[in-house]
Image: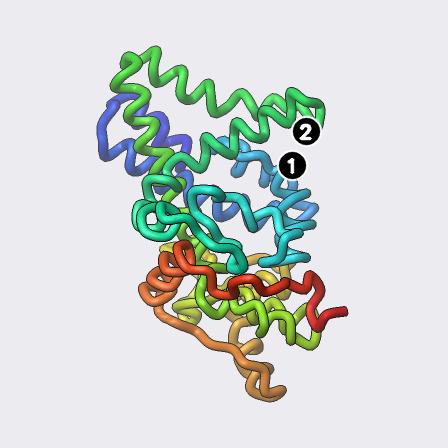
């Protein structure tokens, strides 16, 4: 579907085709996020994440082995992924621009996320820290062909529109997952009895009653606590596990809450500009172990 939308974009250079390419790229990226956790689907991760300009090798190492294990701690590679523009560390002060300007223009900042990620990974590849793969040529080829076919101004503008839709859509959902007021309550996370309870504190969920086929609107990231507790489980099983999670939390008296997506977005913007746990020390392991 994404390839078809790119062909439509290449043949028409229309705004609707650019929007369609951006949306389908985001949905493909959501499947790539799912597959990068499962070793038997590694090739599918290449066909999805790398096809839209990301690095599934980098995601496999950094996302799986850092973000999932050390969520919302200094050992989490996502912790400073948007800094210094959007600050997600709840323990440090923000300057005036970081507090009162940048949080409210976060879509503009996020629209360049693909390019920032691509050039960071490319730099590491040149330094010899990343594996050289032919997939790295896909993004510049897509952009170059559009510029050659329709001219630099029109071709590059439409590609930016597509990539902006992809980035704002995907990264907004991903940031909502870990940047609510609850997620950035360091004292509560530090007091967690174990890693599992810590994941409940640092992950945010919304619209958890949606069946799988309707959750595509949120890129299947609305059941994110389940995903963090069971990262190797395919996302098609998340709605069923979600019901078990709710019952188990009630049984053992573990705090678990779900909010509306609008409320979570509002809290995310607020936490970008306001440190929720200023000057507190984050314990990397749940329970202070």
Residue 133 location, quadrant: top right
- Report the residue marked by disc 1: 57
Q: Which image quarter is the C terminus in?
A: bottom right
Say if 5 sits above or below 180 in the image. above
Q: Which image quarter is the N terminus in?
A: top left
Q: Secondary structure at mark 2?
A: loop
Estimate the x, y position of residue 28 in percent, counting from the top left.
46, 42
Residue 285 location, quadrant: bottom right
Q: Quick one: 225 or 4, which is closer to the camera?
A: 225
Say if 270 sits above or below 43 in the image. below
Q: Residue furthest right?
A: 289
Could you tell me if the residues under marks 2 and 1 are in contact, i.e. CB atoms within 8 Å?
yes
Q: Residue at x 53, y 34 (%)?
A: 54
Q: Residue at x 24, y 23 (%)?
A: 12
**Which mark sits nearer the N-terminus, 2 or 1?**
1
Q: Quick one: 78 or 210, which is closer to the camera?
A: 78
- Report the residue marked by disc 2: 130
Tag shown at residue 69: none
Estimate the x, y position of residue 119 in percent, counting from the top left.
52, 27
Say if 186 sits above or below 257 in the image. above
Estimate the x, y position of residue 172 in percent, counting from the top left.
40, 51
């Amino acid at each position: 579907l994404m390839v078809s939308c790119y062909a439509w974009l290449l043949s028409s250079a229309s705004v609707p085709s650019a929007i369609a390419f951006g949306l389908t790229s985001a949905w493909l990226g959501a499947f790539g996020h799912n597959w990068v956790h499962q070793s038997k689907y590694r090739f599918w991760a290449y066909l999805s994440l790398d096809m839209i300009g990301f690095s599934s090798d980098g995601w496999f190492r950094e996302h799986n082995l850092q973000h999932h294990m050390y969520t919302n701690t200094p050992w989490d590679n996502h912790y400073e992924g948007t800094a210094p523009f959007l600050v997600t560390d709840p323990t440090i002060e923000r300057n005036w621009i970081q507090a009162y300007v940048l949080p409210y223009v976060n879509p503009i900042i996020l629209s360049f996320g693909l390019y920032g990620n691509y050039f960071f990974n490319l730099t590491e590849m040149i330094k010899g820290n990343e594996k050289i793969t032919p997939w790295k040529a896909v993004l510049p080829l897509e952009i170059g062909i559009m510029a050659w076919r329709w001219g630099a101004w029109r071709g590059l503008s439409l590609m930016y529109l597509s990539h902006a839709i992809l980035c704002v859509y995907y990264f907004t959902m991903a940031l909502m997952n870990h940047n609510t007021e609850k997620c950035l309550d360091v004292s509560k996370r530090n007091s967690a009895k174990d890693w599992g309870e810590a994941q409940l504190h640092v992950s945010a969920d919304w619209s958890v009653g949606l069946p799988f086929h309707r959750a595509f609107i949120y890129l299947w990231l609305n059941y994110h606590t389940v995903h963090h507790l069971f990262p190797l489980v395919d996302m098609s099983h998340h709605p069923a596990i979600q019901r078990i999670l709710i019952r188990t939390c009630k049984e053992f008296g573990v705090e678990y809450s779900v909010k509306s997506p609008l409320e979570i977005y509002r809290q995310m913007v607020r936490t970008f500009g306001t440190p929720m746990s200023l000057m507190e020390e984050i314990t990397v392991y749940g329970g202070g172990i």
